[in-house]
Image (spheres, grey):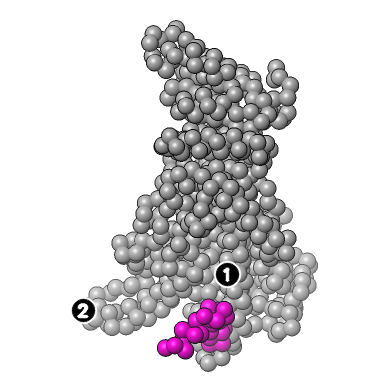
Amino acid sequence: MSGILELRRRPWAKYLLPAVVMVSVALFPLFRPPLDGFMDDCIIALAFVVMALGLNLVVGFAGLLDLGYVAFYAFGAMVVGWWASDFYTGAGGDDGIHIGVSGFSATLPGIHVNFLILIVGAMVVCAIAGAIIGLPTLRLRGDYIAIVTLAFGEIIGRIFQNGDEITIFGDYKLSNGRQSIAPIDPIDLPFLAPFDSAINLRPYYWTIFAVVLAVLFMNIRLRDSRLGRAWIALREDEVAAASMGVPLVRTKLLAYATGGSLGGISGAFLGSYYASVNANQFQFGLSIFILAMVILGGLGSIWGVVLGAVALSFVNTRLIPDVLDQGFVGDQLREAGLDFSFTEISFGIFGFILVVMMVLRPEGILPERRRQMELTEGIGETESVFEARG
Amino acid sequence: MSSNGSILATVRTTKAFGGLVAVSDISIDVAPKSIVSIIGPNGAGKTTFFNMLTGLYKPTAGRILFDGQDVTAKRPDIITSLGVARTFQNIRLFSTMSAVENVMVGTHARMDSGLFGSMLRTPSVRREEAEVEERARETLTYVGLAKDVHDQTAANLSYGDQRRVEIARALASNPKLLLLDEPTAGMNPQESQRLTEFMEQLRSERDLTILLIEHDMKVVMGVSEHITVLDHGEKIAEGKPEAIRTNERVIEAYLGKQAHD
């Protein structure tokens, strides 16, 4: 007992637990088979963590309710769809265009760009998209921002779902419509052989784990910075923030752009991982799914959001299909002669989880210190006197 | 129009909300390092006038000149960075942030670190953060906030301390002109007296010009060199405290004797 107390006083002790957790999460694939189904679920969960952390910057930090976050996933996925497949077969003649790719993809026609470049590309595209979606919302507040962002998400999804009718630069289609763009090139990192999801999932796992670490690092630093303070000030009281010298337009657009670019990373990664990009995935439901992760974990709380994303992702990939549909509950229902699939009502289940949370713990699993006070002490209510301007 | 040497001048500034003219044709001149008050009954347009000065409202007509520059309808953050800071009638602190963080937000316009610098936490960003935090604590001590509550959440501070933090937050932007909107509201006579002395101190130690909206006549008469009286959005009188005290229109406006037409 006294030994533990002794340990706690050491300055490095507070890093011990996180370090142990990080190392075990990093090393766990070594103890699983290379094509493990559980690892597959973990990879998807980590990709959702990146998206949830991005949305958390916008909704949790800056307080701008964004219901169209799927747009950034869409842009990220389309970036690899366009530039890491043989979709644009005609481009660059018979040989195609190849930048930094090796192995089999280097022999294919079409445009093939290295994954690392595409990640940066997806971030840039999404940052620009974020700034564009931000512009019309600058004069709006609260619920109205939500409506505009919702529309934006729908518009982007629809455009890509009908993109086979839209041609640019002559006969280049914008997207493959409701059909997938496939195959997407495998991820090809410097000094490593191209990844192959048919043989070994570990490289994908470590890649997205590294991305999560980088994004976490960035989020924590931003939160405790001049910009992070400005975001929180904006969320608390826009009028006071502006009067204290916080430029509203710039600060809000930075939130949309930074948050959006993280969605782009995730979209590009999942596109490469599935080796296929399908515009049918660009649905409003995905925006809500990610928002639910943020709310479940705790708006504005970085570690809470990580937890919320992992939890909901596993509910989606494990609990609903395996435990409910294939497990005891599903068996009972089938025996009773009911043809019932929980997968079809997955959004009802997410909604139910949120309702339960709102009743039991509205501030989220791991609430942000500030947010918890707002809910429990009813502070942070301010009326507004302000003429918005662009 | 603006007299030479004034730090703030408004020229026939008007604000109308639809058909309602909240502030009409107000021209004032504020000399540097003076303490000037704007008084008037409730609804006279004092706070609307402040909101125009700080850029929250765009004037319908007229001009606002600060420190030789035209700041009419400029954005609030730009006006702040030029050197105007304010407090609010009903305290508007960032309630879930600590006192120090509130004051640090006040320094926003005087800081340089951007998105990428903050992510990488470069040495210059690190240095700036440390400096700003230290300065924020100094400012909090300067306005009289006890050291042990510097890190307390703003919402949990006492009313008087919240007022102090709001002034510290305004001072953090290193202003030339400080606008105080009813700073003594809710204070007892002793506290008001202390604040009056503090305003004098601010002027002499920090070379500040102070423009004050105030209802407490004892404070107003004690501290101001010049008083402007508004009623129904119009300037009905201005001058030295002694002159205002005996001005008939002012007495009428306050006591509501016989409405002037």
Residue A322 appears in the figure:
yes
Residue A296, position as x, y percentages in the image: 41, 65
Front disc: 2 or 1: 1
A20 is within the stretch colored magenta: yes
Q: In what element is the residue under mark 1?
A: helix
Residue B131, position as x, y percentages in the image: 67, 57
Do tag 2 and tag 1 residues touch (Cβ < 8 Å)? no
| Residue found at x 34% / y 64% | A361
Earlier-in-chain disc, 2 versus 1: 1
Above or below — where is A380 with respect to A297?
above
The answer to whether residue B102 is left or right of residue A128 is left
Residue A173 appears in the figure:
no
Q: Which mark is residue A216?
A: 1
The answer to whether residue A331 is left or right of residue B59 is left
> In the image shown, does B141 or A332 lie closer to the viewer?
B141
| Residue found at x 49% / y 35% | B193
Above or below — where is B120 with respect to B98?
below
Amino acid beneath label 2? Ala
> In the image shown, does A314 or A73 lie closer to the viewer?
A314
Q: Main secondary structure of the magenta part?
A: helix
| Residue found at x 58% / y 65% | A219
Same chain shared by disc 2 and disc 1: yes
Q: In what element is the residue under mark 2?
A: loop
Location of residue A340 (image quadrant)? bottom left
Number of other residues with Cα within 10 Å of mark 2, as a class: few under 14, some 14 to 19, many 20 or more: few
Number of other residues with Cα within 10 Å of mark 1, as a class: few under 14, some 14 to 19, many 20 or more: some
Residue that badge 2 annotates: A336
Amino acid beneath label 1? Leu
Q: Which mark is residue B211?
A: none
Residue range in magenta is A1-29
Q: Quadrant of the C terminus of chain A?
A: top right
Q: Mark 2 falls within which chain? A: A
